[in-house]
């Protein structure tokens, strides 16, 4: 009995509409992929099925590692999540702080019609979430210490919807912090200015915009089905094919398309790359960076990489100082290291 | 022999199971007279009329606090209030709860309930650091009475004081709660203090333990049949709005001794009725009192064994912790009211009325916070934090609050506190009360919307990655 309880909690994401891998979304994802292959790519139904459920992809070494990482990370999340700061804690602190700012008037927009408040909150929290995901994702690629852990995700050589869980636990902590800050901030500000009418438009208990994002094929981002949009739309919304470009090993695709639902952030900050029709992409990283399926390597190499980076930085910071001291001694200035420490 | 023993045991077990099932909704009393050697004609050993008299003195004192005309009748009002506080040789009129249309009350003077009673002799007299001047509990009450008498209808608009509320809520703790948890449910449960194998006093028809326990129940202030009423009904009885629910014996008048709901029980029912509706303070406290009393009666006038006293102390612990929570719930509720009142003051509409409500709710907040500090437990750092956050007076619209009382007994408004900052303090008071007392009803929770929204958004702890 206890075993089934444990299993239930580990697999709970599949029955939770707040999660991308909710079975309903997965079902719609398969449907979209099949319709796209048959209607746009002119495949036969049979070959479309074969393509979607390609065993070489679903059971590749990389995918098998994804499944194992999913299980390990679930256990880790159950253990770690009570220790993480919640969006409520952040919202409460900020809510207190807002009271202390003299020129801010609580309930300034209380008279706004409820429907408008709810719509505004629903849209704002979705946009703030998406924007901060873009930023954190960008930092993950740009800052070597963060890249060391984000590599785990990019080491996938084949992609399935479960690849969304291919994440180093340290990165999971950073993402949950981001969520807590972004949501806590938005909640506190809205409740402070709009009062208790603030609410969320939901479908199946999830933000209606997240719901739309998921039922329009968010799972295809991590797949080999490269659905693309019109170029003008790929400036606004991130197509599955664009995210696959983000995972491409090709040099010209590096550090492109960090966005989640919206592509506008990439467009604004110069990291947008439209999908390229007919181009075959290779996913993954060179062996010198990460291994696609060896779990020990996946979980522990990031620590080694971070350690190496810190040591290297420490050296470059220390050497000029050391050199300067020698120089000052040579100059006959015997004030010694006290001057250096200033 | 063995067989008959078995039969006897079975009978006892079945009987006790049946009786415990039957007792679940039973009133507090009557319980039989068990005292050895009693030769009178009484058949019910339950007696707590002295405590009811004190509740009536308290309710009347609160009403009397509103009789001042701004100074001209100060001496007269103070004398009237002191008569209720210190007791009087004359028979005092019951100012509250008095008969009104649709709710006739049987007694109209205090002596009809019990003679020679006062509040001051049963009032918390330890240090009360929640009030300026490092005074004892009784001195604080006397000072409040003096200021109430000199005020206009119990209201001080400059300092934001509502004397009736302050005196009343403080007294709910300093008299009722303090006497029950720090006296009757504490040292009077020891073996050598008011033993059960002797009458409470010579000639009494109740034992030492029976009467001590009854007195604690009397201070709680529930009607003897409160357990069979809903929180809404108990509340309405106390507001003198539900004659049918109050009139347990159906004689058409309300006997204050057994059929009325007074302050502490009223606030227990109030917490159950409002907020999250997830508490049962009234039932929990009432049942512990009634079951404890049944346990004492079952000793049949013999001294209680150590096991019986341990069981009784367990009931006392339930009463004490739940009673403390009801005071914390009330403090929490009024911190929320004060928070909302400040919004109204800032909006500028009906400023006189908004300020009056603010002072009223602040008086309740402050009074209950002082009540919480009048019990058996020293609240330590919690008390220090709470007193600092609430202050000695409400923050007034000019950004000042009472900081001390000078040598002439006048308030000094020397602490700066904007209304905005004071709102934050109220949020912190609510958080402190949740963290310290684990209260759950949480009426007027000023950050409930945040929690509800967080629940709706869901926790972000997941390892999803793009």
Image: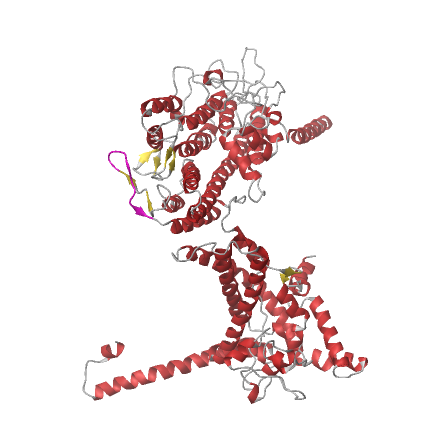
Residue A309's place in the image compared with A184, above or below, is: below
Along the line of sight, which residue is nearer the eye, B339 or B251? B339
- Which quadrant of the structure image shows residue B143? top left
* Residue B435 in the figure: left or right of residue A251: left
Task: Tell me residue A9's x, y (percent).
Answer: 65, 61
Task: Tell me residue B299's x, y (percent).
Answer: 57, 24
**Residue A286, visible in the rendered structure:** no
Task: Tell me residue B297's x, y (percent).
Answer: 57, 23
Residue at the image point whose x is 49% and y is 31% from the top: B263
Q: What colour scheme governs how the chains and residues are painted in the rendered image of this protein? A: secondary structure
What residue span does the magenta drawing correspond to? B406-416
Residue A109's place in the image compared with B284, above or below, is: below
Q: Residue furthest front?
A: B349
Residue B290's place in the image compared with A180, above or below, is: above
Image quadrant holding the N terminus of chain B, namely top right
* Residue A90 in the figure: left or right of residue A114: left
Along the line of sight, which residue is nearer the eye, A220 or B216? A220
Magenta span dominant secondary structure: loop
How many numbered marks does the figure carry?
0
Task: Tell me residue A229's x, y (percent).
Answer: 65, 80
B410 within the magenta span: yes
Image quadrant holding the C terminus of chain B, namely bottom right
Along the line of sight, which residue is nearer the eye, B351 or B64? B351
* Residue A243 in the figure: left or right of residue A318: right
Residue B193's place in the image compared with B350, above or below, is: above
Along the line of sight, which residue is nearer the eye, B252 or A67? B252
- Which quadrant of the structure image shows residue B160? top left
B174 within the magenta span: no
**Residue A60, visible in the rendered structure:** yes
């Amino acid at each position: 009995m206890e075993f089934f309880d444990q299993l239930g909690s580990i697999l709970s994401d599949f029955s939770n509409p707040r999660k991308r891998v909710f079975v309903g979304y997965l079902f719609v994802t398969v449907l979209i992929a099949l319709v796209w292959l048959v209607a746009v790519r002119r495949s036969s139904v049979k070959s479309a099925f074969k393509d979607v459920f390609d065993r070489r992809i679903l059971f590749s070494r990389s995918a098998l590692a994804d499944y194992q990482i999913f299980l390990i990370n679930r256990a880790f999340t159950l253990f770690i999540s009570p220790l993480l700061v919640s969006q409520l804690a952040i919202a409460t602190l900020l809510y207190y702080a807002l009271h202390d700012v003299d020129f801010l008037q609580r309930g300034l927009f209380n008279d706004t019609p409820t429907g408008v408040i709810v719509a505004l909150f629903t849209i704002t929290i979705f946009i703030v979430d998406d924007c901060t995901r873009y930023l954190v994702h960008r930092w993950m690629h740009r800052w070597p210490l963060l890249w060391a852990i984000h590599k785990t995700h990019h080491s996938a050589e084949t992609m399935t919807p479960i690849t969304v869980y291919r994440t180093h636990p340290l990165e999971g902590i950073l993402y949950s912090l981001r969520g807590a800050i972004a949501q806590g901030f938005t909640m506190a500000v809205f409740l402070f200015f709009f009062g208790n009418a603030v609410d969320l438009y939901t479908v199946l208990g999830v933000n209606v915009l997240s719901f739309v994002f998921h039922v329009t094929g968010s799972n295809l981002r991590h797949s080999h089905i490269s659905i693309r949009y019109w170029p003008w739309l790929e400036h606004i919304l991130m197509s599955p094919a664009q995210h696959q470009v983000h995972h491409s090993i090709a040099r010209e695709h590096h550090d492109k398309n960090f966005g989640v639902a919206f592509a506008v952030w990439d467009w604004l900050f110069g990291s947008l790359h439209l999908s390229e029709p007919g181009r075959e992409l290779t996913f993954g990283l060179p062996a010198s960076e990460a291994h696609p399926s060896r779990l020990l390597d996946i979980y522990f190499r990031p620590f080694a990489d971070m350690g190496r980076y810190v040591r290297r930085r420490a050296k470059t910071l220390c050497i000029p100082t050391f050199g300067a001291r020698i120089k000052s001694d040579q100059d006959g200035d015997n004030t010694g290291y006290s001057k250096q420490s200033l | 022999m063995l067989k008959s023993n078995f039969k006897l045991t079975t009978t006892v077990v079945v009987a006790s199971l049946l009786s415990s099932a039957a007792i679940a909704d039973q009133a507090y009393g009557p319980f039989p007279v068990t005292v050895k050697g009693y030769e009178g004609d009484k058949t019910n050993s339950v007696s707590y009329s002295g405590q009811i008299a004190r509740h009536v003195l308290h309710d009347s004192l609160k009403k009397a606090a509103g009789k001042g005309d701004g100074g001209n009748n100060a001496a007269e009002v103070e004398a009237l209030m002191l008569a209720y506080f210190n007791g009087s040789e004359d028979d005092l009129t019951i100012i509250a709860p008095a008969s009104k249309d649709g709710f006739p009350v049987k007694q109209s003077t205090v002596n009809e309930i019990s003679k020679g009673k006062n509040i001051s002799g049963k009032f918390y007299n330890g240090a009360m650091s929640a009030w300026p001047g490092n005074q004892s509990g009784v001195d604080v009450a006397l000072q409040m009475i003096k200021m109430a008498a000199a005020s206009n209808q119990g209201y001080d608009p400059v300092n934001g004081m509502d004397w009736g509320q302050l005196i009343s809520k403080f007294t709910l703790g300093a008299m009722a709660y303090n006497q029950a948890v720090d006296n009757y449910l504490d040292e009077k449960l020891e073996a050598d203090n008011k033993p059960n194998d002797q009458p409470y006093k010579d000639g009494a028809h109740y034992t030492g333990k029976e009467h001590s326990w009854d007195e604690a129940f009397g201070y709680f202030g529930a009607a003897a049949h409160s357990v069979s009423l809903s929180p809404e009904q108990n509340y309405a009885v106390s507001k003198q709005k539900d004659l049918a629910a109050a009139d347990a014996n159906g004689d058409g008048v309300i006997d204050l001794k057994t059929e009325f709901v007074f302050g502490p029980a009223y606030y227990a029912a109030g917490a159950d009725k409002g907020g999250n509706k997830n508490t049962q303070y009234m039932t929990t406290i009432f049942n512990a009192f009634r079951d404890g009393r049944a346990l004492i009666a079952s000793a049949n006038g013999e001294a209680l064994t150590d096991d019986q006293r341990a069981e009784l102390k367990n009931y006392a612990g339930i009463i004490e912790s739940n009673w403390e929570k009801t005071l914390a719930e009330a403090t929490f509720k009024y911190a929320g009211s004060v928070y909302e009142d400040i919004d109204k003051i800032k909006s500028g509409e009906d400023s006189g009325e908004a300020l009056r409500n603010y002072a009223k709710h602040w008086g309740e907040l402050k009074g209950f916070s002082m009540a919480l500090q009048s019990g058996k437990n020293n609240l330590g750092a919690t008390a220090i934090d709470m007193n600092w956050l609430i202050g000695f007076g409400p923050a007034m619209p000019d950004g000042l609050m009472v900081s001390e009382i000078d040598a002439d007994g006048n308030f000094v408004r020397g602490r700066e506190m904007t209304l905005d900052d004071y709102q934050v303090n109220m949020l912190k008071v609510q958080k402190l009360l949740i963290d310290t007392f684990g209260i759950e009803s949480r009426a007027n929770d000023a950050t409930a919307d945040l929690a509800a929204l967080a629940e709706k958004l869901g926790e972000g702890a997941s390892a999803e990655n793009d």
